[in-house]
Image (cartoon, rainbow, N blue to C red):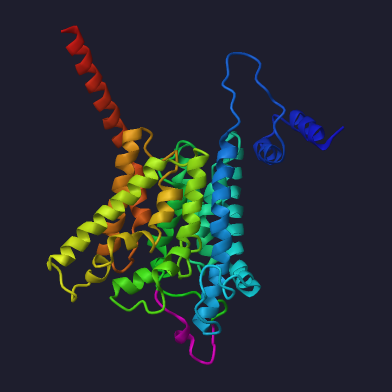
Amino acid sequence: MGLKQNLHNFKVKNQNKKWLPAFNALFTFLYTPNETTHNGTHIKAADDLKRTMNTVIIALVPCLIFGMFNAGYQHYLALGEITQAEGFLGASFWTLDNLLVGAATVLPLVVVSYGVGLAVEFVFAVIKGHEVEEGYLVTGMLVPLIVPVDIPLWMLAVAVIFGVVIGKEVFGGTGMNILNPALTIRAFLFFAYPTWMSGDKVWVHGAVERAGTPDAISGETLLGAYAQNTSLAGIDYWDMFWGLIPGSVGETSKFLIIIGALFLIFTKVGSWRIIISTLIGALAMGLIFNGVVDAGWIGESSKFYGLMSVPFWQHLIIGSILFGAVYMATDPVTASQTNKGKWIYGFLIGFISIMIRVFNPAYPEGVFLAILLMNVFAPTIDHYVVQGNVKRRMKRLKAKVA
């Protein structure tokens, strides 16, 4: 008798145990369940929640691997032990040393994110007597990609507990939450530990006392430099596009994010309407700010001038607007469900993101706040879209009757 059948028999014998949901989660992760339906009409499809989650994870893996290399690269670059890489395919970037240094810090973030998050999921499954849901598979991968690489692990653990409990479980679990759990975790970190989340310093592994000048190995990120009207010497637009810049683990390489977006659109997991409309909204807000600067309504002495004067298209290759548009805004649970609603929802995310980025120089990024805000308004947007459709149909009906 095979291992699968033995495990199935064990499950049947213990079907009244409280810990059975935890066992079922491990069983269905390893094997296809033996249970089948016998009555009624059913729609058969190859996709399910677990496959959908795995598709998103596959799209995120390149960003994770690149983030490890980039963490090591930024480490050695800040120390002055290497020079600026020759480009995305440069030999000084894709080195084993960069990977090892990056993995030494990034992988613990992944382990804590999944370990703590799934532990909370298992506890709630046992207490409430329902199956463990696969929704956290994506959240567990997203969280390490949207935090600074040097975030203390205990802070991440506390935030994950808060995000899973408050952001999802209190609403009833996967499919019932109104806020994106990963962004709820990010918001908790931002408000509870703002000095750790400012993102204004380049991370350096083991930076305690190097030649007696620890301050010499720190530097601003791109958004921080723009907000302070300081120079971006040594970094060009292609560095920003390929991802050879400091930032959160998964947000830097716009090239890989675009590849992930195309994959999600091709597999019909991500909404192209939300992605495109988010970028249009960001470009529109950027154009408005550029017009304000060109009209002379704001001078270089203003603390808002730096980010207002950024060319509108450049907002897409700095910060996390592209990452948020592809992997966060398209969350099928918290996003708008109607086609017209998706255009409105995405546009407002992009528009508000750049607004917050410019007017909050203390923390020059606003994507996660904009998405959380629109998560709350997504049902309202859909409601008015549906009501508008109903009214138009009623008018057409009355016109035909008349």
Screen quadrant of the N terminus: top right
Q: Residue 217 lies in magenta, yes or no?
A: yes
**Percent x, y of residue 34:** 72, 28
Q: Position of residue 204 (x, y in %)?
A: 52, 77
Instruction: Name above or below for residue 198 compared with residue 123.
Output: below
**Residue at screen point 31% across, 78% down:** 230
Magenta-drawn stretch, dominant element (helix, strand or loop): loop
Pick the residue in front: 122 or 234.
234
Query: Closest to the observer: 295 or 206?
Result: 295
Farthest residue in the top direction?
401
Q: Is residue 92 magenta?
A: no
Q: Is residue 158 visible?
A: no
Residue drawn 40% across the image and 50% down it: 325
Give the tally of numbered discs: 0
What is the x, y in percent for residue 216?
A: 45, 86
One can see residue 23 in this view = yes
Residue 362 position within the rendered picture, expressed as x and y whole percent measured from the top left: 31, 69
Q: Quadrant of residue 76?
A: bottom right
Quarter of the view holding residue 91: bottom right
75 on left or right of 301:
right
Quadrant in the rendering for residue 82: bottom right
Specify the segment rendered in magenta: 208-220
Q: Can you name the residue that lies furthest to the bottom here?
A: 212
- Judging depth in this view, the residue of 2 and 52 nearest the camera is 52
Q: Answer with left or right where residue 248 lies relative to residue 121.
A: left
- In the depicted structure, whether residue 218 falls above or below residue 321: below
**Which of the two residues, 120 or 2, is positioned nearer the viewer here?**
2
Quarter of the C terminus within the rendering? top left
Residue drawn 82% across the image and 34% down it? 6
Please name the residue shown 63% across and 14% down the image.
Answer: 39
